[in-house]
Image (spheres, grey):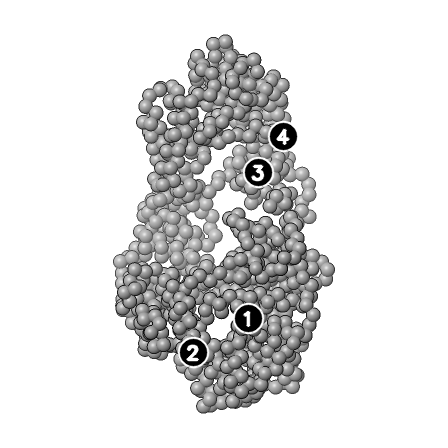
Amino acid sequence: MRLLTGPPGSGKTSTILAQLREALKRRDSGVRLLVPTATMAEHIRHLLAREGFLVRPQAILTLSQFTEPLVGDLPQATAAELYLLVVETLERQCPPQFAAVREFPGFCAALAEGIDELATAGCGSSQLLGVAPGFATVFRSVEDELVRRGRALRPVRLQRAAQRVRRAGTGTIHTVWMDGFLSLSDPELAVVETLARQVDLIVTLPDGEVAAPSREALLRMGAAERHSGRLRPLPATESFVAATPDREADEIARRILAEISSGRLFREIGIVVRNPELYAAVLGASLERFGIPARFYFSTPLAEQPAARGLRNLVAALLSGWDHTSSLAALRWLSAGRNMDRFDFAIREQVPARGLEPLLTLAKQDLWLAGEIRRLAALDSWRSESLRPEQWVSRLKELPDTELLDGALDETARCLTGRGSLPLSRFWKGLEAVLRMSPLYPEDRRRNVVHVLSVYEARQWELPAVFVCGLVEKQFPRHFPQDPLLPEAARRQLQRQGIRIRTQADREREERFLFDLAATRATELVVFSYPESDARGVPNLRSSFLADSAWRPALACRPAPRLSSRWSGPVAIREPALLNLLAARHAVMRPSSVETFLNCPFQFFARHTLGLETRPLRPEERLDFLLQGTILHQVLAEAVRQPGDLETLYDHVFTTLCGKRAVPRGYRAEYLRREMLDNVRRFLEEPRLPPAVEIQTEWPFRMPVADSLEVRGRVDRIDKRADGTAVVIDYKRSTPDLRKTNRLQGPLYALAVERGLGLKPVGMFYCSLKRRHEIRGWSVPEARLGVRSEPLTREWLEEAERAVAAAAVEIRQGRIAPAPASPDLCARCEYRDVCRYQRAAAAMGAGS
């Protein structure tokens, strides 16, 4: 046996691949290359195939694939099966110290992961007994149950494979290389030791403390060590910092396109991440927006697939007695893309609710939907039945679109064998665990793609250009909290018994090694990056692995508009019949509608011409600013008209309006109820304007403004003064910004009072009903109202009237193009996903 060692990037893999190429040239079928993961094996096969070599699949394998023919009679227990065995053990004989937490899935998962870690380190339950007795009891029960079922964990199977190789040999295999392993566990070393007696074995391991125990074990077996120094020069290094992970991903995409424009291929570029759970979605979204093909070498839980989500929603709806939220999600799955938006909106407006009869009432106009709901009713009996696991599998397989889940259903039945008859709720808990713990690797055979790799997956990869992202503390390096099941003292005690289980210090050393590994995957260019803040805006601390070098800020960037080449003309309505329809529909407008048009013609078109509805708010969101404003306006109007017990009036209005909107009672609703009551009371008790001889509230008006155009609205409050003047007041939930040039409500309200009531407006104010009760607006200086304000002039009133007339002309001419007055408006626009306004998107990116 030979041992080839060296630092990351020292060329160990190149040496092994060179020897493999020579064997392939000789068409030698007696060689095997063993690597840690299946995707690594696939990558090396593709690499050699592009060089013209014919590579049989069995020539490059994982260690598990290599040993599988030797232990096929001893199936490996899956992660889900181990988890369910832990759950079963805790239900049957739970140690007293675990009694309070045995129902928590996270605790059961931690126990299962701990058992797997201990078994991988070569530790059995008997060795754990003196260290963690409660844990050892659960471990022993799991071991016994696995033996009874004829199944085993991976370390046991490796030991069985070593025994069989020792007895039967390796057949025609005469040379084995093992490359890409960071270290080797004791069960893996048992296989290595046996192979070394049968074949010419070459093992590569890195330098440093991470692999030191494995190197020492191989040397004790008689391995001849050869150290490999660095064979290639260090790549060029660049670095940048971005505002957020989204902007970091955009900058990576921009730099990738720059590399492509210089002649590099997509497949020559890689992105290495330490935390795929944080970066996979962010990188995927950015690369797709920029049109960059990419393959992600990560598995996703089977539970995240549409079929699994649909089945979960259906079972949740059934078990809940057809809760409408879950039932709606289940019907969406069954609809297979069928348009049921109106039904969807109707359901969302009335949740929380349950039962199929109300759903049938809402679906009476849709025969297909009504039929699906009646078919759901046929499942009602499932809720009270108890069946054997295989019977539940048969029933669930009869549901539509569950073919992808057949394997998970069968595994669940096998894991629950011996449990007898079970209610659906108990079977579903087992199936959920299987779905959650079953990895699914998407099929992707594209060749010219950017490779997005975890740092472990990148071990055997070498690419011309590599990006290493997310370099912040607690991410890279990761922060490892104390393990409550196996604390540091217990781990050190096990190490003194000769068990190679990792401690906190070992994990920290591995993090440093992984960074060095990622930094050496590039042959020409490596780019380091990190975000200044996380997605919530919380500042990040730059990774301690990074040197204090010059960090360039990420450039503001957005993908080029993909549709710009197809259409560059003006966006407007030209059909005469449609223009006549526009004129008729908008013959009467509210001031807020005109303001919407001036803010963005497309927003006006979507909201007021097409009348596009937004998705109803969730129950906890229904007490929004709009409803809060309605409550405050009605309370203030009634309080002025009929002074009395303010709290009684307020509670009546609040309860009535919240009841109509089905606002659930809870902490948020009660907090806002009290806050608004305090604000109203303070506003009425502390007047900021001079007293009036008469107060008129909720005054409706219609005012001609231009040819065949009227403006209508409702003035919150008019303070009439003895000299025939008036102060116009409009209540606002928050303090308005008078600097907005498109604000027309104030001057139009003032004109309406002047023309409709014959009163001269000397003041127009917005009164904030927040705690500070700020008053902002316009006034005639001679009125001496005692409030700082902008001048109320005739020119100001006439300018507003001209703006309305001009807007009306443009509306009737069919102007609907997306043209926001400010890019900031796009972030709050409910139609931003359909307008495709690229300049606004670019400006939003620059603002970040």
Q: Name the residue under label 4.
A: 810
Of badges 3 and 4, nearer the viewer stands 3
Which residue is at a point 54% across and 40% down the rendered structure image? 828
Q: What element carries label 4?
A: helix
Q: Mark 2 points at which residue?
A: 498
Along the line of sight, which residue is nearer the eye, 49 or 208? 208
Which residue is at a point 69% across and 70% down the rendered structure image? 233
Residue type beneath disc 2: Gly
Q: Which of marks 4 and 1 is nearer the N terminus?
A: 1
Along the line of sight, which residue is nearer the eye, 640 or 3? 3
Q: Which of marks 2 and 1 is nearer the N terminus?
A: 1
- Residue 99's disc is none
Of badges 4 and 1, nearer the viewer stands 1
Residue 91 picture quarter: bottom left
Q: Name the residue under label 1.
A: 39
Q: Where is residue 683 in the image (x, y as percent from the top left)?
A: 42, 25
